[in-house]
Amino acid sequence: MSGLDIWMREHTLAYIWLGSYAVALLIFAIEIAMVIHKRKITLQQVRLMRDAEDEAGDEK
Amino acid sequence: MAINWFKYSAPTTFYGLAGKLIPWFALSAAILFAIGLYIGFVVAPVDAQQGEFYRIIFIHVPSSIISMFLYLIMAGYAALGLIFNTRLSAMMATAIAPTGALFAFISLWTGALWGKPMWGAWWVWDARLTSELILLFLYLGYIALHASIDDPRRADRASALLAIVGSVNVPIIYFSVQWWNTLHQGSTIKFTGTSMHIAMQQAMFTMLAACWLYAIAVVLARVRSIILEREKHTLWISELPEVKG
Amino acid sequence: MSGKQLNFWLLGALSWHAIVYNPASSISGFLFFMLEVSNLACSRGDHRLFSGLSFMLHPGQIMQVQGANGSGKTSLLRTLCGFMMPDEGDIVWRGESIRELDEEYYAEMLYLGHLNAIKDELSALENLQISAGLSGIELDEKEALAALRRMGLRGRERLPTKVLSQGQRRRVALARLLASDAALWILDEPLTALDVGAVELIQELLAEHLARQGMVIFTTHQPLQVAGAEMRSLSLS
Amino acid sequence: MSGKQLNFWLLGALSWHAIVYNPASSISGFLFFMLEVSNLACSRGDHRLFSGLSFMLHPGQIMQVQGANGSGKTSLLRTLCGFMMPDEGDIVWRGESIRELDEEYYAEMLYLGHLNAIKDELSALENLQISAGLSGIELDEKEALAALRRMGLRGRERLPTKVLSQGQRRRVALARLLASDAALWILDEPLTALDVGAVELIQELLAEHLARQGMVIFTTHQPLQVAGAEMRSLSLS
Amino acid sequence: MKKSTLLGLLVLVIRRDLVLAMRRRADVLTTLIFFVMVVSLFPLGVGPEMSMLRKMAPGVLWVAALLSSMLSLGRLFSADYLDGTLEQMMLAPQSLSMLVLGKMTAHWMVSGLPLVLMAPVLGLQFDMPVQALGVLIIGLLLGTPVLSMVGAIGAALTLGLRGGGVLLSLLVLPLCIPVLIFGTGAVEAVSTGLSVASHLSLLGALLVLALVFTPWVTAQALRISME
Amino acid sequence: MKKSTLLGLLVLVIRRDLVLAMRRRADVLTTLIFFVMVVSLFPLGVGPEMSMLRKMAPGVLWVAALLSSMLSLGRLFSADYLDGTLEQMMLAPQSLSMLVLGKMTAHWMVSGLPLVLMAPVLGLQFDMPVQALGVLIIGLLLGTPVLSMVGAIGAALTLGLRGGGVLLSLLVLPLCIPVLIFGTGAVEAVSTGLSVASHLSLLGALLVLALVFTPWVTAQALRISME
Ligand code: HEM
Ligand SMILES: Nc1ncnc2c1ncn2[C@@H]1O[C@H](COP(=O)(O)OP(=O)(O)OP(=O)(O)O)[C@@H](O)[C@H]1O
Ligand SMILES: Nc1ncnc2c1ncn2[C@@H]1O[C@H](COP(=O)(O)OP(=O)(O)OP(=O)(O)O)[C@@H](O)[C@H]1O
Ligand SMILES: [Mg+2]
Ligand SMILES: [Mg+2]
């Protein structure tokens, strides 16, 4: 029985919460953040490109 | 019943539709998560054999199930994209892969955390565990292949082929692993949830629904970004309010 | 090489029937057209290389694709080979789109790209025999040696090609022209690394091919004349 | 590019001293010679490519190595770079054999071979900066961009070079000429795949280099003139 | 100069690849040496207990075979791709699947067959009983072609990509797991007295499946990669 | 435009190779995943019995580490060779050994370091005790650079298209075996209660030796291969 085993038996709910649910929710949160970030970046790129095209159009 | 389904298979209309749907999926996912967690941790009683530990099931089983279904859905979209050359299907397949991989990872992780108190080991080479691990590899292979090809059209087609080959192999892998494991091993402790308490069932189904809704919301959000990226040259994109503003 | 010519005439006769009796071919209004490109558009990355490109090529015609570096010559030739899908437009061979024809088209077409498509470890002789074999023609050793010698590789036929000079390697690749019964040659910068003598030889080969009612599409940045044929040209800008 | 010129003059001044005070250099009897090749012989396999080859190259001189395909031009240039050991004879740079000099020689020499020596995955900009860095010169982004634009690659500077056309890739390789302070340029068929405009540009670059008292040895199968310099030529048969 | 047949083409491709392999004998030998090395390293890493080694033997041999055929797969198409030969193959007037089948066969003859022949010697080092050795060889004979063929799909998909070798194994190894399991299962069935035939017939079924589908799939993958 | 220093050159080469690796961000990840997969294959071959797996663990992890760094080594020089960059490197006015050292370092950072970081997780799958895991990591930290460096010699020698390649690669392989023996030995010493330190210090000695000699040897091998 290592230290972790004893701790795990004494604080089962904390173990479950910290180990499983918190990690799962953290992963969800990271995924959401990544999706939002990706949307922001893509929008930025699209706007940049549109501006560049506008300029090119103006030159003509 | 004269819904024009093809209308929604065009990125143009799908983009708007998805934008409208995402908040609803996200909101209901959040509510169901709250309810599911409440039932799971407050209403559901302690299990006679496992004590509190069994409560991991409420996240473990939904993520396992979803990770497996998502692969099939992904392969389906990939096949559609490859055969009918529809742009949206390929984008959907690409958008699903990361979510599927993450659910597979959650399943492995929560399973490992459950295994430690139950079996005394983080990992056991059990058939189900092993095939879930291989599923994660299949997802990662798909993602890696897609990421290493620069030309998006080529990337779509190549990884679609991989997904299809993979989905043919998934059943073969599943049965071979099961056979491998049962042939020379009888002693791995197996959790047999015989008759589940009604509250446990409720909690699990609520969590399953919540996870599905979450997955749909995230995939839709991701596919919207992909549409933006791929179609940035088209007129309709440059006329979107979020692009203009 | 008389067997080859025979072969070619036979093929010509067959294809003549195909043209006359194939209902699809009458759509275009011409009876003798072979390759017809209509309204082709092609882009790489975000970059539109060309669009609205149309031309026809008849037996006995040669066409040079011209343009500065990066203007899309290679891309055009590769599209004609079916490696790349065009964004728009169609490529029609004997009245059918090459998408549908596939292997039938390949049997009548020969492509030579920037890369030599020869194996370093094999000798010139083996390389030629194998590449002819892949395009469906069995060359015996005598025929292959004759072709290589005509290309100025006498005494080098059995060396592994990796020890050959750049120009000699190109000559090995070009020897395929002598061992082919394809009607349409698509050549991407065939003159790369060739010396003056070899350039003249290629000009001869092209003239012979055209005289046999063959067709050629090619690119080059060097001057090239073909005796007895009018050189059409297509400019990409 | 003024920093570069400055650099060059400085180097010139130093080497001047080296020539004047280096006792070894007086052996040859000339005070200004830079590259001296004497009685060189070279063979590949069983095949003697050339022998008894001797020449000298002085600052401001340009020499074209001529010969048919396979006559040994590339082999000669690679021997001058020290990649291949000659069977006989010696190559002397500033009075010392290049075998002994090694890295000192390399610091003053630039070789551009059949291969472009660029990385497909890197952009033209990164490629230029890195290859300059490897030859001991740190280029900042502005300088590198200027060099690439002079080579006609405007708008392509940041694309991975694998998507570039054959001629554009060659231009990226040639951009190194603009970012080098080497005195001796050894160029093996620099004009491969270049269009007419690019060939003119290279002619200009060569003229500039010669005006700076640089030296050039090159091969080509295409015609090439350099304004304001007499073209020496060396024939291998 | 005469027209060649479809079978003639198959023979041509196989002969070509075999000749190429013989010119580069180093490559063939390194695959074999790699196999021997992986297998022989295990006793060093695990310790000399014979009972354990005997138990591990089929697994170790199979894993080593899997890895070494993976190692050589990277070169299956990439050399042809770089020098432009593959382009020419795709322009061949015959079915590309046939060419691909030829290349697969040659690959197996060069990198699979030597392993099969080498395996009994290594098996003896682990003190495997003769009966088990027989089953091992039959298993390898049925299984290694499947590895070559499934691997070819991965090789075609990763063509021209940087880091192709590793990416290739990431794509292919999971797909090869059933072969590994049935192959080792057959050998272990010998000692446990279970049915060897069922494992082997499953391997055979995989082989037939692979023969039917993989050439076509690989040809499609090549077309995609060449675009 | 200014002259660069020797250290600047080292940094340049390392950065260049890292940038090249990062261009395909999947590249780093796939090396890692390959490692994970090779390790996971063994239980599938050998069977799920924990007691046996626990004993095999260090051997399996070390062999897998060797294989993954070897697989990625194949490309260490060959890409540069084929596109002519290596030629240019040999004409660089600085010492070739320095360039080689840079390339080795970059290779280790991309393909060795991630393995070291991943190893503990895999160790847990095999139910390894925590103490053994610590020793495993230290061993890998000392050993993987040696694998990269010794492997580089092999990579340089196999560049040459000469027939001698086989013989020379045979000479290199035995050099990797001591690393494996000391590496696994250290981990096993934990459970048997023997001296861990002696194994690790031997590994350290190998590292120092490799650092001193391999860059120069590799540079010579390259010169031979390029002629
Ligand atoms: C890393 C370890 C684990 C992994 C990868 C894993 C994987 C999976 C998978 C893939 C499923 C879905 C199977 C199906 O629907 O047929 C599943 C279901 C399940 N797992 Fe796990 N598991 C792990 C550990 C555990 C542990 C330790 C327990 C309990 C002691 C457990 C209990 C369950 C239960 C009760 C189900 C639902 C059963 C059913 O629906 O048939 N799992 N797991
Ligand atoms: N992903 C991309 N993004 C932008 N431009 C691209 C991309 N891929 C290719 N290109 C451009 O497409 C063109 C390809 O040209 P192609 O190879 O057909 O030229 P070419 O006419 O054969 O030139 P050369 O005479 O140099 O051989 C080049 O200008 C190249 O820069
Ligand atoms: N092992 C060998 N045996 C016989 N001849 C060889 C061997 N290796 C090389 N050669 C010959 O040496 C010559 C090498 O010539 P090199 O590459 O220097 O020619 P080059 O003048 O640069 O030609 P090109 O204009 O085609 O580039 C070729 O004629 C080649 O056939
Ligand atoms: Mg071109
Ligand atoms: Mg040459």
Image: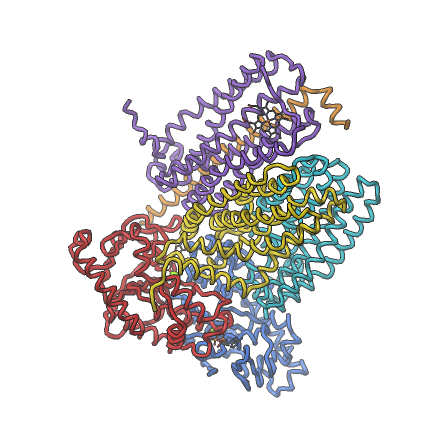
Chain colours: A orange, B purple, C red, D blue, E yellow, F cyan
Residue C215 drawn at (x, y percent): 27, 65
Q: In which quarter of the image is the N terminus of chain B?
A: top left
Q: Residue at x 68, y 48 (%)?
A: F63
Quadrant of the rendered image holding ligand 2: bottom left
* Residue B45 vertical position relative to residue D36 in the rendered view, above or below: above
Residue D27 image-quadrant placement:
bottom right
Residue A36 drawn at (x, y percent): 49, 32
Judge by depth and name the residue closer to the eye, D71 or E29: E29
Outermost residue, right side: F194
| In this picture, residue E27 sits left or right of residue B51 | left
Judge by depth and name the residue closer to the eye, F93 or F141: F141
Residue B232 image-quadrant placement:
top left
Judge by depth and name the residue closer to the eye, E49 or F56: E49
Residue C7 image-quadrant placement:
bottom left
Q: Residue at x 43, y 63 (%)?
A: C115
* Residue C78 vertical position relative to residue C194 in the rendered view, above or below: above
- The reply to whether residue B197 is in sight is yes
Q: Residue at x 49, y 68 (%)?
A: C122
Residue D96 drawn at (x, y percent): 64, 79
| In this picture, residue B130 sits left or right of residue D123 | right
Judge by depth and name the residue closer to the eye, A56 or E40: E40
* Residue E15 vertical position relative to residue D225 in the rendered view, above or below: above
* Residue E25 vertical position relative to residue A57 in the rendered view, above or below: below
Residue C71 drawn at (x, y percent): 35, 58
Count every numbered label the image shows and give the total. Answer: 0
Q: Quadrant of the C terminus of chain B?
A: top left
- The reply to whether residue D10 is in sight is no
